[in-house]
Amino acid sequence: MKSPICEKLNIEFPLIAFTHCRDVVVEVSKAGAMGVLGAAQFDAESLEIELNWIDEHIDGMPYGVDLIAPTSMAVTDDDASSEEILELVPDEHRNYAVNILAQHQIDSTDVYKNQTGSTGAFLTAGKASNIIDVAFSHPISLIANALGVPPRYMIEMGKLNNVQVAALVGAKEHAVKQVEAGVDILVVAGTEAGGHCGDVSTLVLVPEVCQAVAAYDVPVLAAGGIVTGRQMAACMAMGAAGAWTGSMWLTTTESEVSPVIKNKYTAASSRQTVRTKARTGKYSRQLRSAWTDAWESEDAPDPLPMPLQSLVTESPLGRVTKLAETGHQGAKQLATYFVGQGVGLMDSIQSTRSLVYEFMEDFLQAKERLMDAFGDE
């Protein structure tokens, strides 16, 4: 295809797949698109293991890495101890989470017992540099920052190593700041997106950003609710050079997501998601459940800033998922995970490779419909 994304990343089809699963990364790249590994849950040592595995299985095809090094955080000190970080979390928030579990007949007596206080996915400056160094020690073609302007070090390393640096944005003004900072690719994510997202729809945001950065040589990848080829075709008609997708890979057979969550996804409609700060401290979209409803209640404490809210939510939700897999009814009601509004179109569980080919075919059919619409009568 004639797309600047294909040229920049040396891929056949301008479809980028964000995923936390290394198997999905490999399968997407081998099918002619490109997989990007979400490195949020890894430290430097575990990321090294994951990337080594990808290098051994991807047959030299291009792939990327996505990090979360947010511009603003409640914890910025690399030397802060686990105890110091945990002390920043009020008992009120933990107690509220524990009560949610109790109301659904889930034992919560030790749910926070082994908590380390690690900020996990959210990297302070020093930790980000360590992860970035690991990423650039592998033959990646792209590195992305999911929140805010990428660290200066990431941009400099990208230029030095001929690796494309991408950044996710949810507003026009953020896009302008990103290109001024020197990013190579913009991922323009509408509010329909799963995970962290803004409040402007993809249909409005993509052409708005394309217009705002027209003077720069920076291609746009459309994101937010895109799970079909026809949606990518529509976004390319608005000026995008391709699509960045995430949610659609969650229901693949290779995905790391629990079967309980996959079944919830395939049964859900596009209206069964919620955008809230209650999971991470910044707005993110996830599947609506009894858990998300509880945090939207007037009785719920206000979410803590990133990354402290995750120290409240992730341990209880980890227990919920494990119990849901055993058939525990209360846990099944609470079970939730990140997903975009495109979930209403995710109605089957299939292999990653077949999903890529289905997406490509759908794109080509949409292209033909457009050509027919503008053809001679």
Image: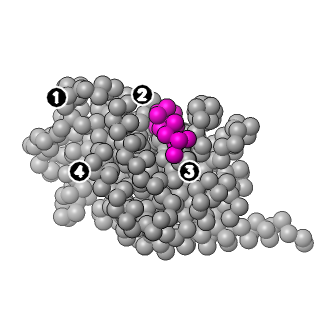
Point out residue 244 in the picture as x, y percentages from the top left corner. Answer: 54, 54
- In the rendered structure, which disc, 1 or 3, sits on the residue that comes first in sequence? 1
Q: Tell me the distance, in whole angstroms, between the alpha carbons under discs 1 and 4.
A: 21 Å
Question: Circle 4 is placed at which residue position?
Answer: 318
In depth, the one of 151 and 76 nearer the eye is 151
Answer yes or no: do the residues labelled 1 and 4 have beta carbons within 8 Å? Answer: no
Q: Which quadrant would the N terminus be assigned to in this image?
A: bottom right
Point out residue 9 in the picture as x, y percentages from the top left corner. Answer: 58, 56
Helix, strand or loop under label 4: helix
- Residue sitting at x 71%, y 50%: 239
- In the rendered structure, which disc, 3 or 2, sits on the residue that comes first in sequence? 2
Crowding near pointer 2: few (<14 within 10 Å), some, many (20+)?
few
Helix, strand or loop under label 2: loop
Does 295 sit left or right of 108 as displayed?
right
Instruction: Report the span colored magenta.
Output: 147-161
Question: Circle 2 is placed at which residue position?
Answer: 72
